[in-house]
Amino acid sequence: MEQKKKIRQELEKQKINSARAWKILLAAGIALAAVYIAGCCYYRSHFYGGGTVFGIPMRGQTAEALKEQIHQKVGEYQLQITTRDGQEIISAEQVGLQYDDQGEVEQLLEEQKTAAWFLMAASPKDDRDIHMTLDEGKLEETIRGLSCMQEANMTAPTDAHLEYVDGAFAIQPETYGNQLTYETVYETVRDSLTAGETEISLDELSCYAAPQIYQDDEKLQEECDAVNRMIDVQITYDFSDRQMVVDKSVIKDWITFGDNYTYGLNREAVDDYVYNMAYDTDTFGLRRTFRTHGGQEITLKGGDYGWCIHKSKTAEQLIGLIEAGESVTVEPVYLYSGICRDTNDIGGNYVEISIAAQRMWVYRDGQCIVDTPVVTGNPSRGWDTPAGGVWAVDARISPYTLTGQDYNSDVTYWLPFNGNVGIHDADWRSSFGGSIYKTNGSHGCVNTPVSAMKTVYENVQIGYPIVVY
């Protein structure tokens, strides 16, 4: 009996607790319903959205209260613009900024789903559009008047690039400068003004012109390595008693850089170098100082003996050697060449002919090996031997037949140096030297005794200089 009584009491207690729970749940439901209904009533006239209008939070505002705040903000409005050099201020008054009420605020409130007011956390938080107007002319004038927009205050950005420093090309970092473009700043400021922004950074809004190439660019590093390989050569031009060296100190100024990491040699600069090299070393057809057999110093200014660099081919040769990375000792490409490349290009192997002395000397390695009288051209007939210059021996022929308008003569040795004028033996003459040439001279050639001519012919090669004065 006692056991049954305890069970009945326990069941009664459970019924009482259950009834209490239902009453609590019912009360909570009624309370929530009341809150929901109250919220629905409240948000028929108030915004629950988390967004902004002209930078003003909408939540909890009525349409009228929000519009009043918009008007108030516009009246006091200033936009603070942070630049890389400081700050600028633009006020609503400067640009004629006004709120043009076209019912957008009421429309936003009508579009609000009142029944979903409890989902406020999920509501949009962006800035909602309203109709703001400004004076485009005043805005343009104001922006153009900003200190940061003055051309004198702007510095353009520079790309990372290569410069020659301490014997090699190295990457120079990019610079950012502070260059702005009117169009970009105008659009940014206009949008910020009509959105009610109070602070903007032109830097953060990417209004500044930016470099296109940065110092960590892999292609720029590859270009740097390649250019340094190009300048790391030494090309020595050999002129016998002097040399001209083309190395990095010269080549660095010839390097040109183009778009898309291209580089090369400035052909015009290379041409100028070769031109100056030719100017300093060419002798073909130029004046020379010559010390005669008798020790007199004379000036020679004619003839076709000497050295002349082929400028275009030498420039091509030089470019090819640099691009190939070859360090070599070479000679230029010559258009004309002589026997000796010393500064005194007549050197120690030459033939000297004096018209006045009617004598010829042949030098080999600086030693006179032939000293002989000769007979030169007949001046009384206008057949003077060309003089006052240095010519090169054009050929060596043995035997040879001399032909002319009124003569046909066989000779054993023939060394032409100026067209049909040359040195040859003349066995038809019994005497040489003196004043014979004045009335019984040759047609312009240098008549030489047979006994001397054999030695002359054996020692004089094609290209040898023939000095006639």
Image (cartoon, helix red, strand yellow):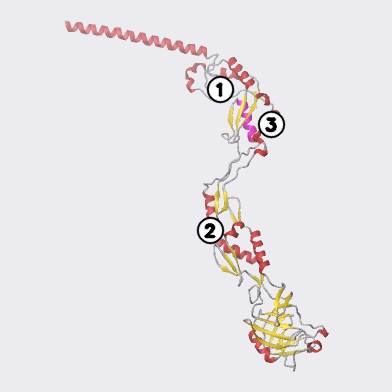
Along the line of sight, the residue nearer the viewer: 81 or 31: 81
Residue positioned most to the left: 1
Please, what is the three-letter code of the amino acid marked with disc 3?
Answer: Glu
Chain-order first, disc 3 or disc 2: 3
Chain-order first, disc 1 or disc 3: 1
Quadrant assignment for the N terminus: top left
Q: Which residues are magenta?
A: 184-195
* Image height of 86 relative to 273, above or below: above
Quarter of the image where one finds residue 286: bottom right
Please tell me whether mark 1 or mark 3 is closer to you in this view: 3
Along the line of sight, the residue nearer the viewer: 230 or 137: 230
* Disc assigned to residue 52: 1
Secondary structure at badge 3 equals: helix
Q: Tell me how far mark 2 sits from mark 1, CA to CA.
A: 61 Å
Q: Tell me how far mark 3 sits from mark 2, CA to CA.
A: 53 Å
Quarter of the image where one finds residue 361: bottom right
Determine which residue is flagged by label 3.
140
- Give the mark count: 3
Chain-order first, disc 2 or disc 1: 1
Q: Is residue 347 magenta?
A: no
Please, what is the dominant secondary structure of the magenta stretch?
Answer: helix
Secondary structure at badge 1 equals: strand
Determine which residue is flagged by label 2.
229
Please, what is the three-letter code of the amino acid marked with disc 1?
Answer: Thr
Please, what is the three-letter code of the amino acid marked with disc 2?
Answer: Arg
Secondary structure at badge 2 equals: helix
- What residue sits 80% from the left and 87% below the top? 438
